[in-house]
Image: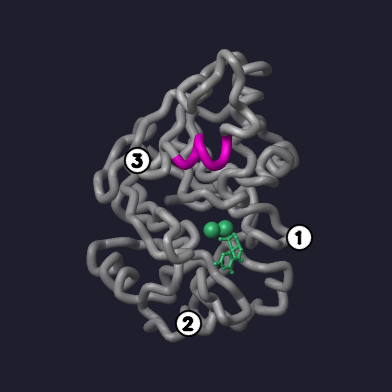
Amino acid sequence: MAVHIQMIGTGSAFAKRYDNNNALIETGSRTLLLDCGITCPSALYRLGRHFGEIDAVLISHIHGDHVGGLEEYAYQMKYVYKRKPVLYVPAPLVAPLWEHTLKGGMESEEADSLTHYFDVYPLEEGEESELLPGLRVKPLRTRHVPGKISFSYVINGTFFYSADMRFDPDLLERLDREGIRTIFHDCQLHPPGEVHAALPELLTLPERLQEKIWLMHYGDDKEAFEGRTGRMRFVEPHVRYPI
Ligand SMILES: O=c1ccn([C@@H]2O[C@@H]3COP(=O)(O)O[C@H]3[C@H]2O)c(=O)[nH]1
Ligand SMILES: [Zn+2]
Ligand SMILES: [Zn+2]
């Protein structure tokens, strides 16, 4: 079955020209939302889509540009579309997502847990699960902000989607050896990357690896870097790429 990824936005957390780095993954007639950040509700609207068309949501880690739109998503599903949405979330993030992020805006007499709003399916690190027919996802814990639990995803065994992660050449080499054909990687154009891979770091990778890498989660001056990314290409918002 053909699987495609389409970025709702490709921007960094502070970008204003590009929306939050959130994606739609489509397989047949089913759609997975990968991260739902602050700009997601309006960016999805500008894409001509709406939350009622989404079959499930998967999150990578708890930062506003990745989960800040979940409250609206949950409320729209409850009060507009009247359907309980499916939430795939790495097991260690289930409790923090409610306790540290959603509870403040969503707790009420009748609603005292994440499971009031979502059908919650915890994912285990390193274990592949079929999230939609034809869509297999394996979470890998990757390094981001020290102490923050954050996951990247291997999709259908051949596609790697970094959430927010530091430069990790050993992991990228291992994925290459294991048959990953395409890597969508977050990229901080201006060093130091610190909590993200910086462009100069990614440029130290061998050309064989760079060929596979598409850059996302970039800043507003991305156009100034066209032609300065070695063999790596930029992911463009709204374009559908095969997985
Ligand atoms: O220890 C920290 C924590 C955060 N930050 C910045 O805040 C942003 C939060 O979203 P993000 O993870 O997409 O990107 C992060 C960085 O831009 C940082 O530079 N160092
Ligand atoms: Zn981010
Ligand atoms: Zn982050």
As shown in the figure, which amino acid type bears the numbered disc 1? Arg
Name the N-terminal-most of marks 3 and 2.
Answer: 3
How many numbered callouts?
3
Of badges 3 and 2, the one in the foreground is 3
Judge left or right: residue 220 versus residue 120.
Answer: right
State left or right for residue 207 relative to residue 157: right
Q: Which mark is residue 201?
A: 2
Q: Could you say whether the residue bearing mark 2 is in a helix, strand or loop?
A: helix
Q: In the rendered structure, which disc, 3 or 1, sits on the residue that comes first in sequence?
A: 1
Q: CA distance from mark 3 to mark 1?
A: 33 Å
| Kind of residue at badge 3 | Ala
**Nearer the camera: disc 3 or disc 1:** 3
For label 1, the SS is: loop
Q: Crowdedness of circle 1 by 10 Å Cα count: few (<14), some, many (20+)?
A: some
The residue at which mark 3 appears reads as 91
Q: Residue at x 57, y 32 (%)?
A: 103
Q: Locate residue 119: give its quadrant.
A: top left
Q: Which residue is mark 1?
A: 17
Q: Magenta part mainly helix, strand or loop?
A: helix
Kindly tell me whether mark 2's CB lies below 8 Å from ligand 1.
Answer: no
Which of the numbered marks, if any, corresponds to residue 178?
A: none
Residues at discs 3 and 1 in contact (Cβ within 8 Å): no
Q: Residues within 10 Å of mark 3 (few under 14, many from 20)?
A: some
Q: Is residue 129 above or below residue 141?
A: above
Can you say which quadrant of the picture contains the N terminus? top left
- The residues colored magenta run 96-102
Residue at image location 38% in from the left, 32% down from the top:
132
